[in-house]
Image (cartoon, rainbow, N blue to C red):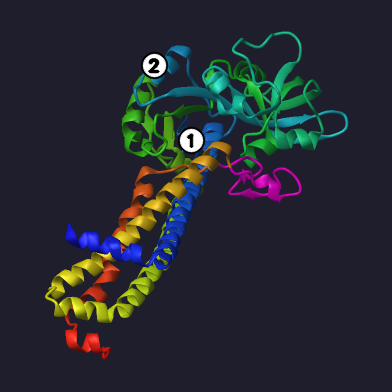
Amino acid sequence: MMVWRLAFRNLVRNGWRTGLTAGGIAVAVALLIFLSAWITGMARTMVASATEAGVGHVLVEAAVGEEAHTLHDAFAVDEAQLDAIAASPLVERVAPRIESFGLLGDEERSQVVRVSGVDPVREGGASSVFARSMREGEWFGAQAPSETGPREVVLGHGLAQVLRVGVGDELVFFTQAADGSLGNDVARVRGIVRTGQSAVDRMTVFFHLEDARWLLALEGQAHQLVVLTPSVYGVVQQAEVLAAHVGEVLGLPVHRAHGPESTDGVVLRTWGEVAPMLAEMVDLTDAMAWIFYFVLFFLAGFGIVNTQRMSVLERRREFGILLAVGMRARLLAKMIVAETVLLGLVGALAGLVLGVGVTALFGHVGIDFSVFTAYEGDIEVLGLQLGEPMYPRVSDARVALPVVVIGLLSAFFALPAALRTLRLDAVRAISGRT
């Protein structure tokens, strides 16, 4: 305990140097925490945008071998089966979707569009990513669509700009139905959605599931089942169990990947298997975080070494006197290590408070990248429009890591000075010849 009291006294005695070094460490740790939280937030935003507005955590499709899916690759599914799948503790919700292509436009302009038929209730209702992302108008209600009057649609933000339409405007939709007939109808724009995923916002028109089934002659069928689970990252370990459950409910063979033999039943794939580039990008963001850690830890360690070396050199005579009056060299070495560790921990803890505080602030208000662009949504990264705020997310493990590592680095970088003190000659130190 005496060693720590001496170490504290020595640090306070040279307050300016201690403050500057601890401040540098604090800034480095705060940067580490904020950058790590920002990278984590960006990765989570990418995954959430791609899964909730796209493939889900798990995607179930008709098995077609190695061929591309077509309009006819649908399978029958009823409400009872959907309820049975959703009853699993591995499933938060499951929603059927119809996916196809068509032509949407008016007398002045038209556009080939991706058709997505959605069940607004099973997609999550008012809490779904679509309902939360409405820019104009409103998302589909829980009630079934009317059989009379124009079909209501929700357009992606980019598609609405291309067609130059707004809420309440009417368009004509054409597509090929599964029975060989021509599906066509008048579509009234109910709302405009901006999910933040450019591929969805630029070319997708959303229909109520029952309207899409009617237009495409696919009553009682679905092209996809989009499954959301309690853990987007833990679903990989549960995929086999979930596949067995889905197969039992549907009464169909369930394959885990497309291949030459997967031509019957359905295929179940996790989001990482459906979008491997997205999974690789998430891994890349983790690698970027570790690069930041390495660089800032190096800079913090360099500051600790420089400060401690100067402190030891300035106190050579003091150390010599302490040795001459009977202090053991081992105790002196312990004091140097204690000083360095205490200096590192004080800076790391200050950085912890600063980093968590700043991260919590931006985690609440978000970081709006649109201020760096002339037009909203001009900048895109990995298919995400940075006109939307990004929210840093603090990870408990990554908050504690800088404090632990700085403490260990401090002890490590104190060892050279401590070992040198063990070999210090009191007479030469007092005379200034060492």
In this picture, residue 382 sits left or right of residue 2:
right
Residue shown at 54% from the left, 36% from the top: 364
From where the camera sits, is residue 113 visible? yes
Q: Amino acid at mark 2?
A: Ala
Q: Estimate the x, y position of residue 31 in percent, counting from the top left.
A: 48, 55
> What kind of secondary structure does the magenta stretch mostly adopt?
loop
Q: Position of residue 145 (x, y in %)?
A: 66, 12
Identify the secondary structure beneath mark 1: loop
Q: Position of residue 305 (x, y in %)?
A: 35, 72
The foreground one among 95 and 167 is 167
Q: Quadrant of the C terminus?
A: bottom left
For residue 403: magenta?
A: no
Residue identifier under label 1: 64
In the figure, 349 relative to 171: above or below?
below
Q: What is the quadrant of residue 377 in the picture?
A: top right
Tag shown at residue 123:
none
Image point (18%, 60%), residue name: 2
Q: Which residues are magenta?
A: 367-390
Q: Is residue 211 above or below residue 412?
A: above
Residue 372 inside the magenta-drawn segment: yes
The foreground one among 380 and 250 is: 380
Query: Residue shown at 61%/46% (left/top)?
Result: 383
SS for dot 2: helix
Judging depth in this view, the residue of 336 and 219 nearest the camera is: 336
- State the residue position of label 2: 84
Say whether residue 58 is left or right of residue 414: right
